[in-house]
Image (spheres, helix red, strand yellow):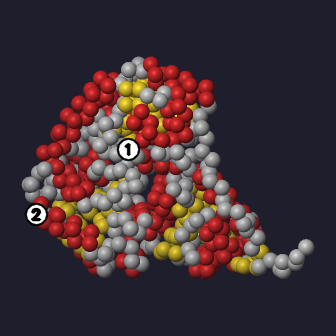
Amino acid sequence: MVYAGPMAQVHGGRLVSKALARHGVTHLFTLCGGHIQAIYDGCLDDGIRVVDVRHEQTAGHAADGYARVTGRPGVCAVTAGPGVTDVVTAVANAQRAGVPMVVLGGAGPRALADMGSLQDMNHVELMRPISKWSVSVPSTDRIQEYVDSAFRVAQANVPGPVFLEMPLDLLMNYAGDDAPATAPAAPPRPGGDPAAVARAAALLRDAERPMFIVGSQLRWSPRRDALRRFADAVRAPFYLNGMARGALPHAHPGLMSRSRRFALSQTDLCVVLGTPFDFRLEYGRAISPTAKVVQIDLDGSELGKNRRVDVGIDGDSGVVLEQLLAEVPDKTAAAWLSAVREAEERSRAKMLAEIASDGDPPNPLRVCAEIGKRLGKDDIVIGDGGDFVATAANVLKLEWPQLWMDPGPLGTLGVGPGYAMAAKLARPEANVVLVYGDGSFGFHALEFEAMVRQGIPVVSVIGNDAAWTQIRRGQVELYGEGRAPATSLDFTRYDRVVEALGGFGACVERVEELGPALDEAFRCGRPACVNVKIAKSDFRKGAISV
């Protein structure tokens, strides 16, 4: 036996960074705090870029955004006490959206626990309801073990956030570097039970009016490309939501977006993949009561929740699509597809006049269409807002590797800067466009300073209608113009805020100014803000906001 010498001793912060590096982490998002400085020191040695922000919520959203772009868990580090409480909203958002992330939380020395040390509080219990796993690392020599477990838990089944509390003394103490030499294993993604798949296939073969709703779980599937093959073979309407947007080319004959209500009311078989029966499907009641329902989900406890299903399949969306394709290699519902396409085109025709509008101030649909003209094949669009963002989601035509990123079903405002910073760092060759509501801009506007200082150029476009319009529209209808407090804003020059922080700013009030302002924002190489005063539109009239 050859003597290998004594095991190298490194401090706890370095053990954290070495474990992160093994999992492919390239960026750590953070706001500084004394409890977590040792982690930064380790990151410098292991080639992990430390990206600092101006609010811990942004650090959390950045970790979430990094995961959405790369497919791997994003990581943020926040200091004890208020550092942890500030990141709570981002963690809750990731949990509801099913996004894997690892939150490293500082804490006072374990020896001083419950004695009133600076920023001492029970972080673990705070995080438990909004994470897949919340735990305090017990000792320095187990740090790498717990980081490995955090990545495994975050990615297993339905992905989600994990919280690791790391007391100050654990990070400062030394322990042996005995990390395993093998790379971490890919997360398992189960297929469906063959008998259940066979029952679903039989329903599909017999259906005259089948439709498919595909949700965010497709993003995490190792077989997510199966959707394209399946949609080519099974010619029926497909509706994509969340992180599944872009999985089919916009020109695909089966891809629909504006006819979902019609299809749901007429279908005889609705296949729902990776989408819960929540408010987006009216808790399952949006589907025709006479239709057969097949539900596929990574969380078996979601199967049949709020709506009876005929077949429930606990499995990965892409893997199950491959299983179904083997059972049903070819099917055409031509008359049904034609009827849905007709409803789709009727709805889209109502949009065209507003998209082509030359009136001043610019119509919001026109603004979104102008953004779309400037997007390249790898670009990323982030939605942070209500009415204007929902308009963009209907107008912009995206196809993978282009990405659409919005908060998801928790509806969190303020996600934009964190998502944008992470997206640009994870995919530096892409243009990253942040579609903003004027209300949302106010949440984390100072993050533009962090972007300027750290050389992270993103393009933000604010649809400025001087209101929280998604809320105000219904408020005025219910109570009247004179009884609608708290939802009005001013036409504020947010572009000047970004200019003052070192970025590019432009204010647009006329259609003729829009194109040149967007072109300059795209080519300036700095964080940019195009603040567009937009006209009123009835496009979103009647949209729910609760």
The residue at the point 37 percent across, 48 percent down is 246
Mark 2 surroundings: few (<14), some (14-19) or many (≥20) residues within 10 A: some
Work out whether residue 480 or residue 211 is closer to the camera in this orientation and state it. Answer: 211
Which percent across, then down, holds residue 108? 66, 73
- Residue 524 lies, with reference to residue 318, above or below; the image says below
Q: Which mark is residue 512?
A: 2
Q: Is residue 404 left or right of residue 366?
A: right
Which of the 4 image quarters holds residue 480?
top left
Position in image of residue 457 (x %, y %): 35, 72
Where the C terminus falls, by quadrant?
A: top left
Residue at 24 percent of width and 44 percent of height = 540
Classify mark 1: helix, strand or loop.
Answer: loop
- Left or right? Give the position of 536 relative to 31: left
From the top left corner, tell me how far across and down residue 508 is, in percent: 16, 66
The answer to whether residue 62 is visible is yes
At a point 84% along the width and 80% down the height, the residue shown is: 5
Q: Return the mark for residue 248.
A: 1
Of residues 71 and 331, the one nearer the viewer is 331
- Mark sitting earlier along the chain (1/2): 1
Residue sitting at x 16%, y 49%: 355
